[in-house]
Amino acid sequence: MKITIEYNSHPLRKLTNKQIEEIEVNSDSNFIKVMELLQKEYGKEFKNTVIDKNTGKIRFLILIDGISIVDLNYKLKDKNRINFLTLVTGG
């Protein structure tokens, strides 16, 4: 099945040299499996950019079809759209 990934974050666009891409995944894929595929494609730097290696927390807001996910085992469906959005903090 195909899913679309949007890199709506400057660090990820710079790393992947893409703003959007389509990838093929197995029908039993979840978000973690997609992260593993992206790490194979773009190297360990991709994982280190997305996940804080000290805390294990994701540094981005992850949307699948416009809905924020917290469960990284979220099962994907054909034609899902994954968005990586930069978290905005401050006061």
Image (cartoon, rainbow, N blue to C red):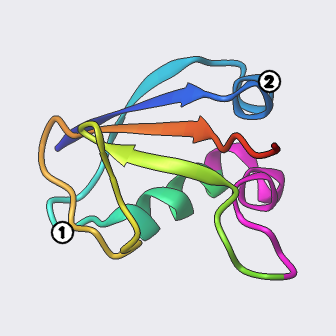
Q: From the viewer's perspective, is 45 left or right of 23?
A: right
- Name the element at disc 2: helix
Q: Nearer the viewer, mark 2 or mark 1?
A: 2
The residue type indicated by label 1 comes to: Asp
Please give the name of the residue rendered at 36% of the width and 74% of the height, measured from the top-left corner: 71
Start and end of the magenta stretch?
41-54
CA gap, disc 2 to disc 1? 30 Å
* Other residues around mark 1 within 10 Å, as few (<14) / some (14–19) / many (≥20): few
Q: Position of residue 7 (x, y in %)?
A: 57, 29
Q: Quadrant of residue 17?
A: top right
Q: Is residue 6 above or below residue 28?
A: above
- Residue 20 appears at what percent x and percent y? 48, 20
Q: Pointer 2: what residue?
A: 14
Residue placed most toward the observer, 8 or 37 = 8
Instruction: Where is residue 18? Give x, y as percent.
Output: 62, 18
Left or right of 37: which side holds 73? Answer: left
* The image quarter in which residue 52 lies: bottom right
Mark identifier at residue 28: 1
Q: Identify the residue at the far bottom of this view.
A: 55
Figure quadrant of the C terminus = top right
Callout 1 secondary element: loop
- Please tell me how many numbered marks the rendered image carries: 2
Residue type at tag 2 = Lys
User: What is the x, y in percent for residue 6?
Assistant: 47, 27
Quick check: 73 above or below 14? below
